[in-house]
């Protein structure tokens, strides 16, 4: 049991103000507060009715189902709303009903994960009395904090990353990505990432972890460094941040630095360009966080794949039905760019859901519009599962919420959005990403079915101890500290 939550006050579906550090935390709404309150009240009652402690109830499938049902209640769910968590009421108390809805056997390929090296050289680049990522100091982290030292960073370490991802969630494969930084201040270096991949490989999970190579072509030396990343580190993609650069000035992919990066990646045989779009860092160089350049380079480089991390989503903006030429911010900037450059759905542009889905879980109607538009205009084969964990703790709650989420029939009819069928869920969870990342599902199933990760997980699930913690900054003070020392 997680001793820091022995009373069972943390919910298994985590709706809070946590940010991934790339946008300022946004307080949850009164509806979310009501949902969390209802969920805890109902968990207390349902635990009593099932003869369990509240903690044991919340760890069970019924705990997740009960929490999602409470969120529906708080959002005044009925069939004419835009989006909802599609569960039967019996799932709150009936273990078989709950498992049928919140558990599943999909192939889950998470294309965006993070962690921090708590002992890395990057710490030597900042003042010795500073507290990087101090927004991560939750109860479990405080227990590791010794007299003002940085022991709390262990909560973001590779060991916690492996537990949160491979033990406490249904994730089969993850891509380890990077945060915007210079080489000197990377909280996880390419060497760290490869070391974590090696540790997972030693668990006979050799195909379970892939890595990106970080490059910002407007920074000195980064273009030349692409050669080493591709030749020495077996990267699966290059990851870039177009809003990031010297003096806070970014670039567009169709600018000279962007094109130089794309063409160099192509020469090196790396066909995937992963680009952070949306979730703007702030007002400076804001335009570079938008997606007007995506359709241009997708048209000019049809043999390259452009994976749009966060899908252009802007936290706090309401997603509405797409209207051509309306000039709305957010996901619509991606759709508009694709339409303007005649990029058909299911082409060489992919929309990734890291942080995007986690934020959308707060607002089912917003989620229905965002997902519906991506399925319709980017393509049902080109929406990729990502969670941005470890910042949000274990991604299991994001998985369970997506397993049960549905777009209402009204929204389907009015806006041309598809129903989220089991087949579509399987595509998003992993089958879609297997194409650009060159992973064969059958091979992965064979390799992972009996590896040590699976064996350890089977033993672990006899007495699971998920923390239900999130680690990212939760308010402005923590966010500014995160920016100062963490990114």
Image: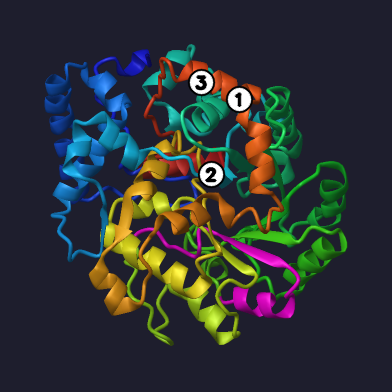
Question: Residue drawn at (87%, 52%), measured in percent from left and top?
Answer: 227
396 to 155, vertically: above or below = below
Left or right of 373, for residue 343: right
Image-quadrant location for residue 62: top left
Q: CA distance from mark 3 to mark 2?
A: 17 Å
Kind of element beneath mark 2: loop
Residue at screen point 66% across, 36% down: 446
State which quadrant residue 201 falls in: top right
Residue carrying label 2: 108
Pointer 1 local density, CA inside 10 Å: few below 14, some 14–19, many at least 20: many
Residue behind mark 1:
453
> Quarter holding the N terminus?
top left
- Secondary structure of the residue carrying tag 1 is helix
Q: Which residue is mark 3?
A: 458
Residue in the picture at 76% in, 68% down: 257
Q: Which of pointers 3 and 2 lies earlier in the amino acid sequence?
A: 2
Q: Nearer the viewer, residue 115 or 453?
A: 453
Q: Position of residue 283 (x, y in %)?
A: 47, 64
Compute the Cα span from label 1 to label 3: 9 Å
Residue 118: x %, y % from top left? 61, 25
The residue lying toward the viewer, choosing from 317 and 173, is 173
What's the magenta region? 292-316
Mark 1 or mark 2, earlier in chain: 2
Q: Is residue 323 left or right of residue 339?
A: left
Is residue 105 visible to the viewer in this orientation of the structure?
A: yes
In the rendered image, which quarter contains the C terminus? top right
**Marks 1 and 2, how far apart at CA:** 15 Å
Residue 162: name its quadrant. top right
């Amino acid at each position: 049991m997680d001793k820091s939550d022995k009373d069972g006050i943390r919910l298994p579906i985590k709706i809070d103000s946590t940010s991934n550090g790339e946008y300022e935390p946004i307080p949850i709404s009164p509806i979310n507060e009501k949902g969390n309150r209802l969920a805890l009240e109902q968990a207390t009652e349902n635990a009593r009715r099932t003869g369990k402690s509240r903690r044991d109830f919340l760890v069970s499938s019924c705990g997740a189902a009960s929490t999602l049902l409470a969120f529906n209640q708080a959002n005044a769910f009925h069939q004419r709303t835009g989006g909802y968590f599609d569960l039967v009421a019996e799932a709150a108390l009936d273990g078989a009903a709950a498992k049928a809805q919140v558990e599943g056997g999909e192939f889950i390929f998470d294309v965006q994960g993070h962690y921090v090296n708590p002992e890395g050289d990057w710490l030597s680049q900042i003042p010795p009395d500073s507290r990087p990522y101090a927004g991560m100091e939750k109860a479990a982290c405080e227990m590791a904090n010794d007299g003002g030292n940085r022991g709390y960073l262990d909560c973001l370490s590779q060991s916690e990353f492996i537990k949160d991802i491979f033990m406490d969630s249904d994730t089969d494969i993850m891509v380890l990505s990077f945060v915007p930084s210079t080489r000197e201040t990377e909280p996880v270096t390419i060497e760290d990432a490869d070391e974590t991949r090696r540790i997972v490989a030693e668990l006979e999970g050799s195909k379970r972890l892939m890595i990106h190579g970080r490059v910002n072509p407007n920074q000195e030396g980064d273009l030349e460094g692409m050669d080493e990343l591709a030749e020495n580190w077996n990267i699966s993609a290059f990851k870039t941040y177009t809003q990031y650069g010297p003096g806070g000035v970014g670039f567009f992919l169709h600018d000279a630095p962007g094109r130089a990066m794309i063409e160099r990646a192509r020469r090196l045989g790396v066909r995937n360009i992963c680009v952070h779009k949306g979730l703007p860092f702030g007002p400076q160089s804001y335009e570079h966080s938008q997606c007007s350049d995506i359709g241009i380079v997708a048209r000019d480089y049809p043999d390259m794949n452009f994976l749009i991390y966060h899908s252009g989503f802007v936290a706090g903006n309401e997603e509405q039905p797409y209207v051509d030429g309306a000039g709305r911010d957010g996901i619509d900037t991606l759709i508009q760019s694709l339409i303007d450059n005649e990029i058909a759905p299911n082409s060489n542009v992919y929309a990734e859901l890291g942080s995007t889905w986690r934020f959308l879980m707060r607002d089912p109607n917003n989620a229905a519009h965002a997902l519906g538009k991506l399925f319709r205009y980017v393509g049902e084969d080109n929406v990729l599962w990502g969670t941005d964990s470890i910042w949000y703790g274990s991604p299991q709650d994001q998985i369970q919420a997506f397993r049960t989420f549905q777009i209402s029939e009204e929204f389907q009819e009015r806006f041309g959005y598809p129903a989220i069928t089991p087949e579509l869920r399987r595509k998003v969870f992993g089958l879609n990403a297997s194409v650009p990342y060159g992973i064969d599902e059958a091979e992965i199933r064979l390799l992972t079915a009996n590896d040590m990760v699976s064996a350890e997980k089977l033993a672990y699930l006899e007495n699971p101890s998920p923390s239900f913690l999130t680690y990212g900054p939760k308010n402005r003070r923590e966010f500014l500290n995160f920016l100062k020392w963490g990114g």
